[in-house]
Image: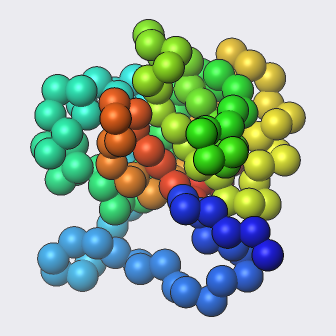
Amino acid sequence: MYYSRYCQDENDQEEEPVSRNINDKIQQNLKVTALTLDSEYKKSGESADNIYKGNILDVSGVFGGVKKDVYDEKYLSFINKNKYLNVHAYMKINEIKKATNIKKRTAITVTCEGDGIITGTVILKNCTTD
């Protein structure tokens, strides 16, 4: 069975939390562009973490392709000003194949959990496509 640092296998039994706020109310997904995410994290990682990390996000942007990181794990990238330090959307295992069929430079939206920033790269995990 394949396990990723950023994605749960679809057979895992762990349930996703329904909400993340202090009053335990159900909240809607935050809608944000990949460019805004990148910009907000570059301005202040701590402030951006308070807004995005651990929350479910609908991230829209221009598809840059499916790539592999240094650990040979595939992720979806968004086109951005810096082609090396962009938003990495680590897809759920069953979503990778769908992502490889998307044409480059197509506008897309993915639903992911925000996971912060690592060495200048915004990380999203457990992502799905529309």
Residue 91: horizontal and vertical position, in percent?
65, 52
Please give the name of the residue rendered at 34% of the width and 30% of the height, measured from the top-left corner: 120
Residue under the point 24% across and 27% down:
42
Quarter of the image that includes the N terminus: bottom right
- The colour scheme used to paint the residues is rainbow
Q: Quadrant of residue 39?
A: top left
Q: Position of residue 76 (x, y in %)?
A: 64, 37
Name the image quarter holding residue 47: top left
Viewed as shown, does residue 106 lie left or right of 112? right
Q: In the image shown, does 119 or 94 lie closer to the viewer?
A: 119
Residue 112: x percent and y percent? 51, 53
For the question of whether residue 90 can be seen, the reply is yes
Is 27 located above or below residue 86 in the figure? below
Give the residue displayed 68% in from the left and 37% down from the top.
Answer: 68
Q: Residue at x 82, y 36 (%)?
A: 100
Eyeballing the image, is 93 above or below 10?
A: above
Query: Which residue is the extreme one toward the bottom?
Result: 13
Query: Does residue 32 appear in the picture of this structure?
Result: no
When the figure is inspected, residue 76 is found, relative to residue 126, above or below; the finding is above
In this view, the residue in front, 16 or 121, is 121
